[in-house]
Image (cartoon, grey):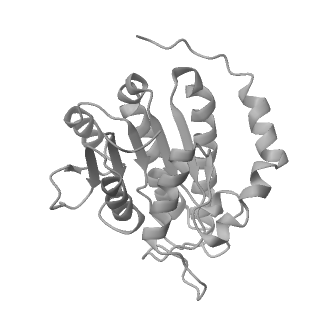
Amino acid sequence: MTFADRSVLVTGANRGIGQALVEEALRRGAKRVYAGTRPPLAHPDERVTPLTLDVTDAAQIQAAVESVASLDVLINNAGVGLYADLSDRAALEQHLAVNLFGSYDTTQAFLPLLTRSRGTIVNVLSLAALAPVPLDPTYSISKAAAFSLTQSLRAALAGRGVAVHAVLSGPVDTDMGPRIDIPKASVESVALAILDAVENGDEEIFPDPLSASMAEGWRDSASKALERQMAAFVQAEPISS
């Protein structure tokens, strides 16, 4: 697929990777970009439609669905990172509410539109989904759960023609980025790499130098082979007209 003449929804679009994804989709010729944010958003490009969208708020998700006539690409980018200790259950619950259930609820709400367009879902995750980050273990748990959700959606939706991608990024220069002195990729380079990989059909996307060093090993890994074997057990659902 390409992003030219497509309609795209990006959650968490007011800053960081989300903001860069909006700009990159516009650069690639998207006909409409819905920018989902909690605070109000203004954008000079008339192709951008701001949506008030807290992914933990069921009423706001439903209102967003009612504001979108058609959708080709959903990018679940909204997330939170609290750098909390593993003993902090409240932090774990907040991470799960946003990073797991926020993506789940938004995807389920927009699934009829995505099925109709035989569209694409992109879940922006982290390398923390594959191995826990000791500095933020409750965040890692939520991203691991969101990765399993992504794989489950991929298997379940293949029969409906909906593609599902996981972004497994390393350190990125955002206010949520790792609080240690290591090289971090720019949000612009990460957004470009994400959309390149979606257009290329990569199921797992490794959009920065650190994560990219793992890409080949992952694609040939026992874990990826097992995912494919498990997916074969899923009975493809008939595509509704």
> In what quadrant of the picture does the C terminus appear?
top left
Left or right: 160, with 14 as reference point: right
Where in the figure is residue 5, as x and y percent of width and height?
Answer: 31, 40
State the residue in front, 140 or 33.
33
Displayed quadrant of residue 141: bottom right
Displayed quadrant of residue 114: top left
The residue shown at (75%, 37%) is 227
The residue shown at (52%, 47%) is 198
Where in the figure is residue 179, as x and y percent of width and height?
Answer: 54, 83
Where in the figure is residue 84, as x and y percent of width and height?
Answer: 55, 72
State the residue in front, 151 or 29.
29
| Whether residue 142 is visible | yes
| Whether residue 90 is visible | no
Q: Is residue 4 above or below residue 21?
A: above
Left or right: 167, with 33 as reference point: right
State the residue in front, 88 or 61.
61
Q: Is residue 210 above or below residue 19?
A: below
Where in the figure is residue 118, as x and y percent of width and height?
Answer: 45, 27
Left or right: 57, with 214 as reference point: left
The residue shown at (15%, 52%) is 46
The residue shown at (44%, 53%) is 98
Q: Residue furthest right?
A: 222
